[in-house]
Structures are given as structure tokens and as C-alpha cells.
Image: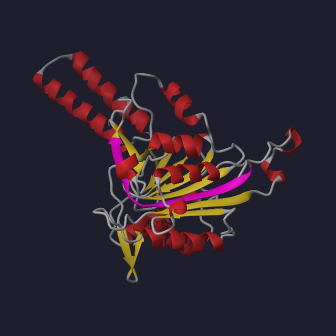
Amino acid sequence: MSANQLPSASQSTLSNCTPRRKSLLIGINYTGSDNELNGCHQDVDNVAEFLKYRGYQDTPQDQVVLRDDLDEEYAPTGHNILAAMDWLVSEEHTTCFFHYSGHGGQIDDPSGKRPSGLLDTIVPVNYKDNGMIDSDILHKHLVSKLPPTSTLFLILDCCHSGSSLELPFVYRSDDDGNVHKLDGYQAGLALLQEAKDLVIGGSSLDREAQARDLYAGATSFWRSLRHHRPWTGLGPDDFTQEWGNEKKTITMFSGCRDEETSADAQINGVSEGAMSWAFLESTKTNPDPTYKEALHITRALLKASEYTQVPQLCLGRELDLNQPLIL
């Protein structure tokens, strides 16, 4: 399917267009493997039903479903996943929806530049032969290729999903409904600078021990906020330019922080992904939530059901979280 021609200057505003809607749903149970899951196919069914209610079409031209109980053409292999991602974001003036339910993982960062030394991944069904899809690849296929006139909404229901797209703005909700923006770059710099000042100020045993603790704290902070730019000694302006200059309208709800794992849930005797269930359930509580409300209700539902994972909201550009969620 080819992308539409770019509009002329007089036709380029979103207000003059009726956006097309496309969706890509991926569910992998890894049936028969040592790492088998139970609820990922059910997640796809539930999300498909939700999208139909929201006005999305389920025709082959508008929706692609990849599951490991389908024919090879629609198996969630690495090749098929990347091809389907490229299809999803290939057109101007399109509202895109992406859902992934399966395993998430982490691999060594081959560049060696990230403080954590790790990249978050999603795990295709044929990962043992062809490897996993890391966050850099996901960013290139879903973020960088998304036309500026299109939008993308994602739900990633997998382990270690907090920074899977390397988006620049990340938020979490606390138990009271307050939403906090995570500024890990500045916080990490502050810890590193404080440790540096201690070392420069003297080399007593107490100072050395305190500096080691601060460096360890900074490293831990960077690991928990790996959506940010790796530490290379550059300033805040360089960081902003590298990760924030795309300014795409992208919204991602991830199942947990980078260091956490997601859980399968048992809902009325049926296996489902806890994050997928909680987000869909939140829309029943409030069909048209704001960004802030959607994040808080999703977290509250997970906590009420005794799931310890903390969902995150990640954005491609800074938005007013009190405005209605774009789906």
C-alpha cells in the first residue's frame, strides 16, 4: 500500500482533512515454548473490540493482526512485525493505533554509550533465530517514519517497556492521582555533579564513601530512566535537540517501568495482560478521559487488583495533560 501524495500548502492543515484510521495489533503467546504466555491472544481480541467501538475499521486495508496462532503470513516474526509497523505509519493524515502484548526483554547496548548498558526490546516469535527488536529500531520504524500530520497511539503490554520507543517526555501517576514528569536527565546530572564536587573537595575516606554512594545513585537513576539520552558530557541543549526535535504526536502507555515486569491477569477466569485489561477497563470508567485521568485510573485499577507494576505515559512532544486523550 503506497503512501498518499503530500498535500499542497493550501491543503496541509489537519483541520481540512478527515484522518484515516489504521491499527496494528500483535499478540504472542509463544505456544509450546519454555516462555509460554496465556493472555496475549485474548488481549488482541479485546483491543480489536475496543477499537471497533471507537470507530476503527477491521478490514484488511485498515487493520493488521499478527498472532502466533495464525498462518505464516500473519505470524509475529521480526520481519513481519517491522513490515507491519512500516505499513502502519506510511500515510499522511492518519490516526494510527499500535498494540503489543507479549514478552519484553533487554539486550546489551552495542554502542556502549548508554549508562545502563542495556536496550529495551520486544520479542518476536522467532527471536531465538533472528533476535529481538530493540528500542532504537522501534524508534526508527514507528517514530522517525511517522509523518508530521499523523498521530500514533500505543499500548505496550510487556516487561521492561518503560522506554521502548525512546520518547522524550515520560510521566507517572502517584496513588493520589498526581502526575509527575520524570526529568531524569537533569536529576542524573545533579547527582553526578554533587559526587564530582565531593571528589574535588578532598579525598578523605568519608568523602570518598559519600561520592561512591552518589555515583551509584546517579547510575541507578539513569538505569530507571533510560528513555533519556545516554551520558556523553553534552549539555541540556544537546540532549533536547537529539531526543525532542522530532516533536511527533505520539502517545504511549507502557505496562511498567524499565526495571519492572508485566503480569498476566486472570479476569473472570480468562487470561489477559494486566496492562491491557487495566487500560481498557479505565475507558469504561471514563470513555473520554484526559491524559492525566487515563494514567491515574489505569494505575489505580492495577493497584486495586494487587499488581505492583507502575504504568507510564510517554509522549513524543510536550502536551497539556488535562486535554482529552487522542485515540
Question: Which residue is outermost to the front?
Answer: 72
Question: Which residue is outermost to the bottom?
Answer: 268
Colour mapping used in the image = secondary structure
Q: Quadrant of residue 195?
A: top left
Q: In the image, is 230 to the left or to the right of 326?
A: left
Q: Where is residue 20 in the image (x, y as percent from the top left)?
A: 74, 58
In the rendered structure, does residue 103 fall within the stretch colored magenta? yes
Q: In which quarter of the image is residue 325?
A: bottom right
Question: Which residue is outermost to the right?
Answer: 10
Main secondary structure found in the magenta portion? strand
In the rendered structure, does residue 309 fall within the stretch colored magenta? no
Q: In the image, is 236 to the left or to the right of 10?
A: left
Q: Where is residue 291 in the image (x, y as percent from the top left)?
A: 57, 58
Name the residue: 47% across, 65% down.
298
Quadrant where the C terminus sits is bottom right
Q: In the image, is 149 to the left or to the right of 218?
A: right
